[in-house]
Image: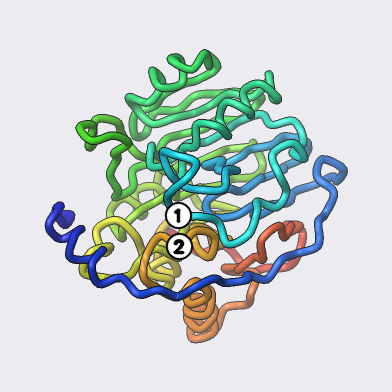
Amino acid sequence: MERPGFLDFLKWQWNRPDHGRWEPPLAEPDPLGEREGRAITWIGHATLLLEVDGRTVLTDPVFSERASPVSWAGPSRYTPPRPELPELPPVDVVLISHNHYDALDEASVEALAEAHPGARFLVPLGLADWFRERGIDRVTELDWWESTEHAGLRVTATPVQHWSKRGLFDENETLWAGWAVDFGDFDFWFAGDTGYQPDHFRATGERLGPFDLAAIPIGAYAPRWFMQASHVTPEEAMQIRDDVGARQAAAIHWGTFPLTDEPPAEPARRLRDARRAAGLAPGAFRVLRHGETWRLSEPAEPRVAP
């Protein structure tokens, strides 16, 4: 699917609605690194902390106030990250889906590299040099379907439909990816950012699934004429869950930054409506509050076949 061009971008920006400030529901903190078993904490946007039997994975870490190349302009958070970066337990693997500023934040990456010397950064093809230029050598870049191992985990880059751009003249010079993480007896898939491309998702499920848990975006879909190639609706997110064969799913990429035109609470409402219409229990595709920890021993629907 062809992505809109620069004139389309200007048209969209000229007609954007203003939804004002939003105060998202917040969860009481659940002490990190002090629990056994399996748990996931939604820190905000696409930033998740997954803890599985003492091993930890962090996705698209953005702890800064703005998703922007500068600290004084650009989309500002509705609420601070919960927990803050210094509160994290030791991190084993950091997954980066692509190089947009709401997924790859320089200040957060540098702080993580310093505070977590055992962490390895896994990035799509072409992004490793960006890390090395900042003195971060614990980085591995992968093409789609390539795998690596670290801290007893096997991690594979998976195809998704998106794009990359960080400066004025580097569009699509680096790859974008989802990530499948095999813990041995627990399988996780992080979609990152994506438009709906069923061939990619079904191939992921066939090769690497089914998954015990998937983290799937549900926001940044409006206006549809501009966002359709790059971001999914909540209803499409439900279909992705089925396509990859996920027993449980957690909603990401919504309600944190004012990036697109849908009201900030709308993605969660639409996902709940779609889940109810499909006759699924809340644990089949869960909407978390900012800072909420989901202990994955809670009951959920059986796995869905790819």
Marks 1/2: CA distance? 6 Å
Of 296 and 59, nearer the camera is 59
Where on the picture, by quarter, is residue 143? top left
Q: Residue at x 30, y 48 (%)?
A: 162
Task: Work out which quarter of the rendered image holds the C terminus and state it.
Answer: bottom left
Indicate whether 252 appears above or below 160.
below
Label tally: 2
Q: Is residue 1 left or right of residue 107?
A: left
Task: Work out which quarter of the rendered image holds the N terminus and state it.
Answer: bottom left
The x and y percentages for residue 219 are 44, 65
Q: Is residue 228 left or right of residue 239?
A: left
Mark 2, residues whose alpha carbon is within 10 Å: few (<14), some, or many (≥20)? many
Mark earlier in primary sequence (1, 2) = 1
The x and y percentages for residue 34 are 87, 43
Q: Amino acid at mark 1?
A: Pro
Q: Residue at x 72, y 42 (%)?
A: 52
Q: Residue at x 37, y 34 (%)?
A: 145
The x and y percentages for residue 189 are 51, 47
Mark 2: secondary structure = loop
Q: Amino acid at mark 2?
A: Pro
* Residue at image mark 2: 258
The x and y percentages for residue 66 are 51, 48
Of 102 and 118, nearer the camera is 102
Mark 1, residues whose alpha carbon is within 10 Å: few (<14), some, or many (≥20)? some
Indicate whether 66 appears above or below 95.
below
Q: Are marks 1 and 2 in contact (CB under 8 Å)?
A: yes
* Residue at image mark 1: 75
- Coloring applied to the structure: rainbow
Q: Residue at x 45, y 62 (%)?
A: 258
Mark 1: secondary structure = loop
